[in-house]
Image (tube, rainbow, N blue to C red):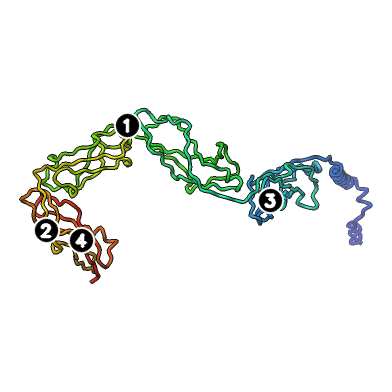
Amino acid sequence: MPQENKAKKSKFSLRKLIYNDKYLIIFSVLAAIVVWIIASMSLSPETTKTVAVPVTVDFSDSAASQLGIKCYGDETIDVDVTVSCKKYLAKDITYDDLNVTLQTNTVTTKGNHEVPIKVEASSENASFTVQSYYPTVYTAFFDVEDEKTMNITLDYDDEDFIADGYIMGEPLLSQTTAVVTGPKTYVSQVKSLVSTISIDDKLRTTQSVDLPVSAVDSSGSTVDYVSIDTSSDNLTLTIPVFKKTTFDVSVSFTNIPSDVDISNFTVAYSNETVDAGVLEDADIEEANIGNIDFSQLTVGENEFSFDVSNFESMVILDNISEITVTVTVPSDYSSQSVSVDKSAVTVTNLPDGYKAVVNSLSSSAVTVIGDETALSGIGLVVDLSSYKNNITDGANDYELTASVENSSSCWVYGNYTANVTITKE
């Protein structure tokens, strides 16, 4: 009997649940919430929201691409799309919910085109509708690609940027040309590449500046849609600045016999001094215009011309391109022709595994200048050290060095060669 009573107590009774105030209150509250949510969703006011959608412009798979026509315009654009939706849904709508595309196959010819933009929801079951969007077209220029290489022209805003007492050397571009690329219609309009240089300070030292370059037409206006390609990442201009100085002109003598006093020689210059520009920190005391080898000197007047239009260490400011130097060897020096033959020739610095045979000399006599009592004992040498990378089997002419043995007051005048056959042993 107790078990039956227990079963009766545990049996569920809907009637009792309904008439139980506690459970009835809970049920009523839950039902009210559900009804409120459903009513809020169905009766929620409509609203609008504008979403910015980023679009990448891509004509790679289009009719224009197949025709060799490229797009010259913005590579990315933003399309502002206004959608209509329930107010409670607006915050969850993003650009991922929208498909924005360009109707690229509408372009089949060159020129300016307005490409239609299409906007639609990403999902067929979208809880919003597209109301409007802007822009509705993508505008760009379309043409076949072209390129041409052009020189870069410098244009100074103000050329008075060098301090007093200084001069500007020849400006040095990191590269003198650049390649213009772009639509053929516009590339053909480019007449020059111009770099405008603006320097505010008065320069006293060499300076390098970055070089902006613009493509301009015949009227000087910038040409659209073209790009300028350079081989270096940073195009620069170096402006050498030199200090104005007056220098005495000089030359250097080489291969001077140890007992020859060149102070007894007369050296005259067509220009004794020159006005020149040198670097601010250059340690230069005179304008040395070149070297004169003693093998070029004979008794009497010897004239040499030196090109002074291009010096690494200085810039000659005088209106001269050449200076003549006259070296007079005193008459108390003698000149004598001394007979020589191939048996007197020594070949030095011959590579291992080779042998040399002297065939002949360019002259059977050499001219010796110096003390008449010491004009004998001529030494002849073919030094192959300077030919080591160009030595080939067979007979060739090689420079011959002639010297006066046992005499430090004489030298050999002129240039001589020996014909030598070189073979492998």
Looking at the rendered structure, the secondary structure element under dot 1 is strand
- Structural distance between the alpha carbons of marks 1 and 2: 53 Å
Q: In the image as oriented, which residue stretches furthest toward the top?
A: 164
Q: Which residue is mark 3?
A: 109
Which is more N-terminal, label 1 or label 3?
3
- Name the residue: 16% across, 61% down: 345
Q: Which residue is mark 4?
A: 418
Residue contact at pointers 2 and 3, CB within 8 angstroms: no
Which is more N-terminal, label 2 or label 1?
1
Q: Nearer the viewer, residue 34 or 230?
A: 230
Question: 10 Å neighbourhood of mark 1: few (<14), some, or many (≥20)?
Answer: many
- Structural distance between the alpha carbons of marks 2 and 3: 87 Å
Which is more N-terminal, label 4 or label 1?
1
Q: Amino acid at mark 3?
A: Thr
Nearer to us: label 2 or label 3: 2
Residue contact at pointers 2 and 4, CB within 8 angstroms: no
Question: 10 Å neighbourhood of mark 4: few (<14), some, or many (≥20)?
Answer: many
The answer to whether 226 appears left or right of 288 in the picture is right
Q: Amino acid at mark 4?
A: Ala
Quadrant assignment for the C terminus: bottom left
